[in-house]
Amino acid sequence: MKDALRYAPLVVDEIDELAEILCNEPVYRHIGGVPSLADFELHHRRALNGPRPGGAPEVWVNIAVRHAVSGKLVGRLEATAHADLAEAAFLYDPAVWGKGYATSGLNWLKDYLRRYDTVRTLWGTTVPQNHRSAALMRRCGFVEVPAVDLPELYSYDAGDLVFRCDLT
Ligand SMILES: CC(C)(COP(=O)(O)OP(=O)(O)OC[C@H]1O[C@@H](n2cnc3c(N)ncnc32)[C@H](O)[C@@H]1OP(=O)(O)O)[C@@H](O)C(=O)NCCC(=O)NCCS
């Protein structure tokens, strides 16, 4: 890919900028509908606060993706690690879809998660209508698995396609 991208932990000061690129109908078409700006901000503030103290051990990874040269924010990567697995999410500005940015991002996230010894597999779920999401995971080496005898997946809803990627 020609365009170099920069990955860094998302911070609270970036939430408004993130809303400008993500809080729109194309992004939320298959993931619950466009939230209000207030809900978008609350969701991201909670995500950045991290897991509840005293709960089961979890790691919440929130990454801002920017063009390395212009510094423009283009997307967000997320991973929630629990038990021996992690679950991924990826949301990009529709203006940059179709350029391979999300492919680079998900491959980056796979490498990043290898630092956590306990995380053996990375999982992703999507409604069947979200063809771009399913294609992205396949392109990044995920394999679709039947939705039976699944481990606990926070992101799974009945009817979702389920994808798994071995990180070992
Ligand atoms: C899911 C999502 C991240 C996928 O984005 P995307 O733009 O399709 O993915 P990429 O950036 O990797 O682009 C892939 C496309 O670029 C093309 N491409 C061009 N250059 C490429 C390159 N160097 N490497 C890989 N693909 C490249 C691919 O062929 C593919 O084209 P296609 O869409 O015609 O099949 C995006 O659609 C999105 O943000 N959706 C809304 C949020 C969402 O639903 N997220 C999923 C649940 S969390």
Image (tube, grey):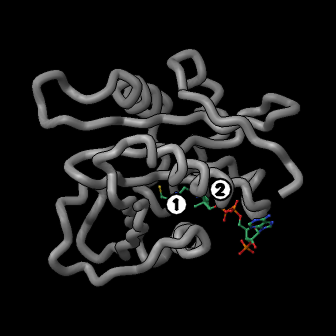
Q: Quadrant of residue 70?
A: top right
Residue type indicated by callout 1: Arg
**Image quarter for residue 131?**
bottom right
SS at badge 1:
loop
Q: Mark on residue 19?
A: none
Q: Badge 2 is on which residue? A: 102
Q: Measured from the top left, where is residue 148 in percent x and y?
A: 19, 80
Q: Residue at x 13, y 36 (%)?
A: 56
Q: Which residue is mark 1?
A: 29
Measuring 30% from the left and 57% from the top, which residue is drawn there? 155
Residue at image coords 20%, 49%: 83
Q: Quadrant of the C terminus?
A: bottom left
Asked whether mark 2 lies closer than 8 Å to ligand 1, one says yes
Above or below 163: residue 146: below
Percent across and percent down for residue 104 are 68, 55
The residue lying toward the viewer, choosing from 36 and 42, is 42
Q: Is mark 1 within 8 Å of ligand 1?
A: yes
